[in-house]
Image (spheres, rainbow, N blue to C red):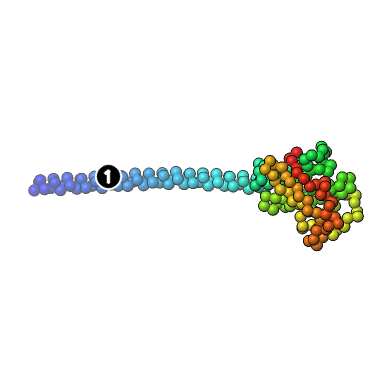
Amino acid sequence: MKFYASLLCLILVLVSCKNEDKKQDEKTNNETEQNENQKTSGVNTKKNNSEIDYNENEESSIDSPDKKSNNSSGSSKAAVSGETYVKIDEKDANCNCYCLELNMNNNTELCLSEDEIYITARYSKSGNNINMYYANPSSKNTNEELPWEDFDTNTPIAVLSPTDNGNLELDWKGFSINGELAVDYAIYGKKTLEGTYKKQ
C-alpha cells in the first residue's frame, strides 16, 4: 500500500512538473510573439513614417515652382518651368527677342518683331509638349494696328516639343480668331520665334 501511495505521489509530481513546463513554454512563446509583434509594428511604423516623409518631400517638390527636376533631356521628358531658353543660331545675349522664359505659373513676354510687336503668353502642358497661348499685348508693344482684342486666348499660338538632346523645338501656329487661323496675322512671330531653343 505504501508502494502505491508513493507511486501515486510520484505520478502527481511528474504531472504537475509537466504542467509547469507547459505553462513556462507557453509563457515564453507568448513573450516571444509579443516581442516579434512589437518589432514588426516598429518596422511598419518606421516604414510608414518614411513613406509619409517621402510622400511629403515628393509633394513639396511638385508643388514648389522653384524646384527643378532633371527632366531637361530626352524626347519623353518635358522642359522645366522657370528655365530660360535661347534660339539656336541667334545672337541675343540680353534676350531682347530670341529667348523663351518658361514659367508654367505666370505669363511671360514674347518678342514677335524686335522693337515693335511684343505679347505676353501663358503655357500649358499637353503630354510631353507645352502649348503656348496668347494672353495680351505686352507693355513693350508698339504695334496698335493688329486686332489684339479679337485674337483667341484659348487656342495655342505655338507648341514646344522636347528633343532628344534636351533642346526645345518651337512650332509656330499663329493667332486665331473664333477658333480659325487668322491667315492675315499668322506670319507674325513665325520668323522670330519658330526654331530650336537650347537652355541658357
Q: Residue at x 38, y 46 (%)?
A: 33
Instruction: Give amino acid for label 1.
Output: Asp
Residue 3 horizontal side relative to residue 184, left or right: left
State whether residue 142 appears in this view: yes
- Front residue of 46/12: it is 46
Q: Which residue is mark 1?
A: 21
Q: How many marks?
A: 1
Q: Residue at x 40, y 46 (%)?
A: 34
State whether residue 104 appears in this view: no
Which structural element holds mark 1?
A: helix
- Residue 173: x percent and y percent? 78, 53
- Front residue of 17/68: it is 68
Q: Residue at x 43, y 46 (%)?
A: 37
- Residue 80: x percent and y percent? 70, 44
Q: Residue furthest left?
A: 1
- Residue 109: x percent and y percent? 81, 47
Residue 69 horizontal side relative to residue 187, left or right: left
Residue 182 horizontal side relative to residue 164, left or right: right
Image quadrant where residue 90 sits: top right
